[in-house]
Amino acid sequence: MAAVTGATGFLGRQVVRALAADGWRVRILARRDPIDPLWRDVAPEVIPGDVADEVALGRLCAGADVVIHGAGLVKARTRAEFDSVNVEGARRVAVAAREARHVVLISSLTAREPELSHYSASKRAGEEAMRSVLGPRLTVARPCAIYGPGDRELLPVFQAAARSPILPLMGESARVAMIHVEDAAAQVAALAAAPSQGVVQALCDARADGYAWRELMAEAARACGRTPRLAAVPKLLIHAIGITNDFTVLLGATPMLSSAKARELLHPDWAVSPEEQPQGLPGARHDLRSGFSATVAWYRSAAWMKQ
């Protein structure tokens, strides 16, 4: 039995599918009974609730062999809002999972650099909160940038690639590791089946050294059938846009490109070092070219992008 939080999210939906394909019975925590086309052949047991509900968490984790904690906030207005889910929620899951043999936390590669943003700091603090309760029974998975069908975060990049005559480059020397969502889910499922060793593992595709922004943007454009110009954007401009967007928080907005997100985007090294690279996990089935092409095809079939 695998118990999963965050099961209805972008990655979580694929994790449930991968677990079921590997023969797990799956129990999920969800606010409502989900209907998902990815789960046509999957019938997860549903525990109503969220990570603020200790009773529901107890029911979720009761009798589970492995608990996979994937619920989290990626956008919030304040550090306190991030911490309420990414730290305190993680701590509650750890307490509820004390009897499980193994717990897998789906964190983020940004937790490697907690000083960059409230998000990255909250993800690192969530790791520490769970480790303080679970010790070596906790395995931490740190996915790099995830993309694929159903992803809303990178959708604007592909929309720009499909219609803009110029695409921005965030830096010539920066490196960004990537992974297709199906590959990330397969690696999480493999971690769930492996004995717990208290390790931290990054999840990435075959290019652990990452991609330059020029390669990423060129492949995004190619997937859209375009060949726009690529132009470096001054870092000061990106920071200025982020700072300007910060003021919209006063109006109740939660902009994606905040000053903190700008610092994450402009960080020069989101590659995966040799000591962080996955050990004993399935290799990625998708390279960047095939993965981007499949993602754009899905966006168009779902009417998220024009044909």
Image (cartoon, helix red, strand yellow):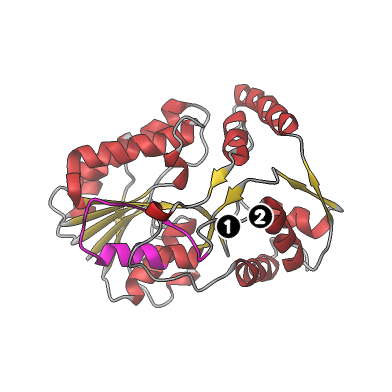
Q: Quadrant of residue 63?
A: bottom left
Q: Is residue 68 left or right of residue 306?
A: left
108 versus 162 height, above or below: above
Which kind of residue does numbered mark 1 sit on? Asp
The quarter of the picture where the C terminus appears is bottom right
Instruction: Judge the density around disc 2: few (<14), some (14-19), many (≥20) Cα neighbours within 10 Å.
Output: some
Residue 203 magenta-highlighted: yes
Coordinates of residue 33 in the picture (x, y in percent): 38, 59
Residue 109: x and y, percent? 45, 47
Q: Which residue is mark 1?
A: 151
Q: Look at the image and tell me in which quarter the N terminus lies.
A: bottom left
Q: Amino acid at mark 2?
A: Leu
Q: Can residue 131 be seen in this snapshot?
A: yes
Choose top left, top right, bottom left or bottom right for residue 188. Answer: bottom left
Residue 123 drawn above or below residue 30:
above
Look at the image and give the residue range highlighted in magenta: 186-206
Q: Residue furthest right?
A: 165
Q: Secondary structure at mark 2?
A: helix
Tell me the number on the disc at residue 211. none
| Residue drawn at point x = 59 percent, y = 33 percent | 263
Question: In the image, is 274 to the left or to the right of 260?
Answer: left
Name which residue lies at 49% across and 71% down: 37
Residue, x 69% and y 58% (percent of image)?
A: 215
SS label for mark 1: loop
Contact (Cβ within 8 Å) of mark 2 with mark 1: yes
Residue 195: x, y in percent?
Answer: 20, 62
CA–CA distance in space, label 2 to label 1: 7 Å
Residue 52 shows in the view:
no
**Which residue lies under the disc numbered 2?**
155
